[in-house]
Image: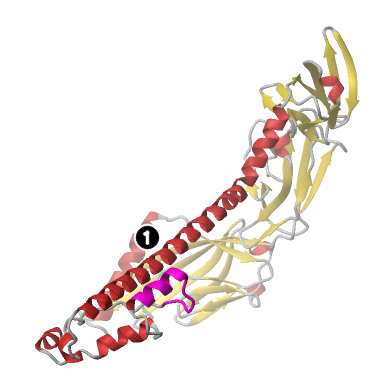
Amino acid sequence: MKSVGSPSFLLFCASVFVLSDTSSDSPRPRILHGTKGMPLTLPVMTRFPLHGVDIQGSWSKTKPDHSHLVSFENGGVIKKRLLRNRISLNLSDASLLIHRLDESSEGEYKLELNIELSEHNREQLMHKVETVYVTVDVPVSTPTIEKRAAYELIEDRDNVTWTCSVTNGTKVQYQWLKDNLPIRPDERHIFSSTNNTLVVQPVRKEDIGWYTCLVRNYISKRQSPSVDLNIYYGPYNLAIKSHQGLKTGGVFMVDPSEVVLFDCFADSNPPNSCVWISKNGNRTEVVMTGLQLEVNPHELAQAKEFVVRAFNNVTQKEDEAQFLVVASPGSAGKQKLTQKETFLSPLAAITLCCPLIIIVCGLLLFKRTCHAKQVIITMKDTLSKRTITEQKRPHRSGHEDATEDFGIYEFVAIPERLDSTQASCRSLAHPESTQDLHTTIYDVIRRIPETPTLSLLK
């Protein structure tokens, strides 16, 4: 026997307390969803001690009909004879296994559990009841859609009825989708009690699309192939357009020197046909039938009023619009010229920039050439003056007058051919010298003596 203060005894008391408390509340049965032809285990949520106690219990089916299934006590199991091969009991946790579900397996099951505990010559008896509701479902098959409607569904006149059905499946729930979005019930969309039928009355343009049916139950889900719905409607939003002339409201300003084309556009299914009518006071005349109107130059001598009618041969509906054509010489030409100027503006900018760049480059090249000639002439004049001055001075040795020639000289390239002015300057500077100016400057720098002034520059 276990002592009163042992952990096993405390755990057992806690379990018994839970059992006693839940049994008084009569909780709602748990629901288990099973698949027909498959096994299903009915677990027991309560945990209880297995050693040192006497356990006795029984499983029974209470709904729809009451029948006893199995009883067990202290390791012994007694099954109902007709259910020996259909159910099994797990004594470790008192769970019940149904080997193969069928329609008769569905219903409410009840477990009654009695636990007797003996401690210090005292006996305690606890009673626990658990209920489980079992559903047995058949997986749904892929649904199919049937559409019952007239051959031609015309807006605001005809109705359409959709019906969704499955070959297999139990407790099927239906949902309708249009373009993969759920359809909500309203005054035009009416559902049957099981939602397997949808009626749209009357149909409208916004009902055009792809319809599917989604079916499901507790164990499976399938979706039908999409079926399209076509509805004839219109014409709506009639508009007149032209690539020529300028439009202001319902007035077209066109050039009378060229042919003008007008196009008729409307939202319509099937596509509408157009009739073009010219108006002259109270007189009207059908000019052309088709989606395009051609107006010749001789008809544009003055303002002219036109009427276009869009007609749907299926819906038998029509729409009408009026417009005025005014001859305005040069109006179309201005528009074309504007378009050409807009198109040619980048090319014109490039054309104008190229000569400007060439002129600037030429000026820079000319400036650099003149500057080089000016430097050369200035240096030659300086050398000439210095040569004449040296001729007037008493003769001194190279080491004595080299300090006067000390300085920083610019080495300038001189063309091989010299004009008459440059040649005369050179002859004045040194009539007998035919040596190149590069050599002369180099010689001057080369003959600099080692003097205190040179050391300061270092």
Image quarter (top left, top right, bottom left or bottom right) of the C terminus = bottom left
Residue in the foreground of this view, choosing between 278 and 428 = 428
Q: Residue at x 74, y 25 (%)?
A: 254
Q: Amino acid at mark 1?
A: Thr
Q: Give x and y (percent) for residue 42.
A: 53, 69
* Range of residues picked out in magenta: 414-428
The reply to whether residue 155 is visible in this rendering is no
Q: Percent from the top left, x then y, of residue 294? A: 85, 29
Location of mark 1 (residue): 22
* Depth check, front residue: 121 or 150: 150
State the residue at coordinates (15%, 84%).
457
Q: Which residue shows up at 43% across the image and 56% down it? A: 27
Q: 83 or 198, which is in the foreground? A: 198
The image quadrant of residue 306 is: top right
Circle 1 — which element? helix
Tell whether 347 sits left or right of 384: right
**Number of numbered discs on residues:** 1
Left or right of 252: which side holds 16? left
